Image (cartoon, rainbow, N blue to C red):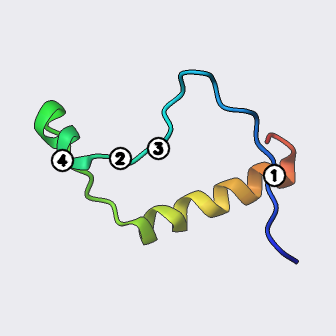
Amino acid sequence: MPLRFVHDKPFAYDVQRRVPATEKAKRVLGFEATTSLEHMLDEVIPWIVQAVDTGTI
């Protein structure tokens, strides 16, 4: 089945394109993420599944 998604109309002055700049976080905040996407997804996906199963989201 083709992917379909529904979303609200954007705000009149909403950002049109979001491109995260991680180098800015490091420069301004002194923060650099060290967790890989793969590791983060291993944590987040089970949490989402559990939250859906329990009806909290």
Q: Position of residue 19 (x, y in %)?
A: 38, 48
Determine whether, in the image, residue 23 is placed left or right of residue 4.
left
Tell me whether circle 4 and circle 1 mark residues in contact (CB < 8 Å). Answer: no
Q: Quadrant of residue 46?
A: bottom right
State how far apart marks 1 and 2 are (Cα). Answer: 28 Å
Q: Amino acid at mark 2?
A: Pro
Tell me whether circle 1 and circle 2 mark residues in contact (CB < 8 Å). Answer: no
State how far apart marks 4 and 1 are (Cα). Answer: 34 Å
Q: Amino acid at mark 3?
A: Arg
Eye-nearest disc, 2 or 3: 3
Q: Which residue is mark 3?
A: 17
Q: Which residue is mark 1?
A: 52
Q: Which residue is mark 4?
A: 23
Residue drawn at x 44%, y 44% is: 18
Residue drawn at x 63%, y 62% is: 45
Eye-nearest disc, 3 or 1: 3
Q: Secondary structure at mark 3?
A: loop
Q: Position of residue 41 (x, y in %)?
A: 52, 65
Nearer to the camera, 37 or 53: 37
Q: Which residue is mark 2?
A: 20
Residue drawn at x 79%, y 55% is: 5
Eye-nearest disc, 4 or 1: 4
Nearer to the camera, 54 or 12: 12
Q: Position of residue 24 (x, y in %)?
A: 19, 40
Q: Secondary structure at mark 4?
A: helix
